[in-house]
Amino acid sequence: MNDEPLREGWYLMSPADLEIELRRFRSRSGSAEPSNALALETEEALRYRNAGNLPDHLGRTLRLVLRVDSADELRALDEKRSSFEPDHHDAPDWRRPGSKPVNVVPLRAPGIHVPPIEDWLDDEAMADLETRWSQDGTVFGVRVPAEYRSFIYKTALSLKGAGRPVTVETIVDSLKRWLTAKDVDEIRAALESENRS
């Protein structure tokens, strides 16, 4: 990569490239050694993803760099991702042996800190869903087994934020982005069992 600083958008990068680029970003000097990161336009990136997002000869895969200029933007990262990857909640039918998930890299402006949430119920939106779930066992109308609540809450909130319906199928498709096939199958079976008419 040339001396251009890391910017918001799509890149092909290896883990080593990402480390170099983050050091350059944090130092603001651009003095770190150059990396092999390659900036891509959205159309190119989605074509690469749809071809499997397989590591290239330099070990690079897709990374979506998103600027974060406030704590609210950090919390709404999923919504911002949608402008670059509108179908990121869909089941990743582009995956094949060797495929890597799309890696999202939040680029925080200096001074942007969000205290870590020690317990998922410390998050106001998650706590609200837990309160509702404790009353009738549902999340946005979908019956959810107790042991899968934390997975489902995050996913349901993300779907709602993207303006998508919350159903067993949309939850499962979204979970496929980051869970193993075995875990997804287990959660699907539990949700389908709970939601049989």
Image (tube, grey):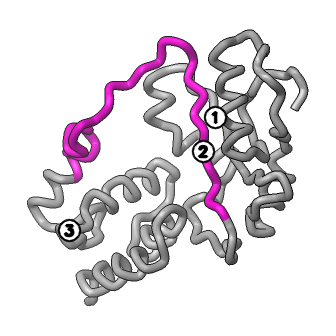
Residue that protrudes farthest toward the left in the picture: 135
Residue occupying the point 67% across, 72% down: 95
Placement of the C terminus among the 4 image quadrants = bottom left
Q: In the image, which residues are magenta?
A: 100-129
Closer to the camera, 94 or 158?
Answer: 94
User: Is 59 positioned to the left or the right of 3 in the image?
Assistant: left
Kind of residue at badge 3: Glu
Closer to the camera, 196 or 55?
Answer: 55
Asked if labels 2 and 1 touch by Cβ distance under 8 angstroms, the answer is yes
- Residue highlighted by disc 2: 104
Badge 1 element: strand
Q: CA distance from mark 2 to mark 3?
A: 27 Å
Q: CA distance from mark 1 to mark 3?
A: 32 Å
Quadrant housing residue 171: bottom left
- Residue highlighted by disc 3: 147
Place of residue 175 in the rendered image (x, y in percent of width and height, measured from the top left): 46, 66
Residue occupying the point 27% across, 62% down: 139
Task: Indicate whether residue 120 is drawn in magenta.
Answer: yes
Task: Indicate whether residue 127 is drawn in magenta.
Answer: yes
| Earlier sequence position, callout 2 versus callout 3 | 2
Q: Residues within 10 Å of mark 2 (few under 14, many from 20)?
A: some
- Residue highlighted by disc 1: 66
Rendered position, 75 above or below 174: above
User: Is 123 positioned to the left or the right of 110 in the image?
Assistant: left
| Earlier sequence position, callout 1 versus callout 2 | 1
Closer to the camera, 182 or 137?
Answer: 182
Kind of residue at badge 2: Val
Kind of residue at badge 1: Leu
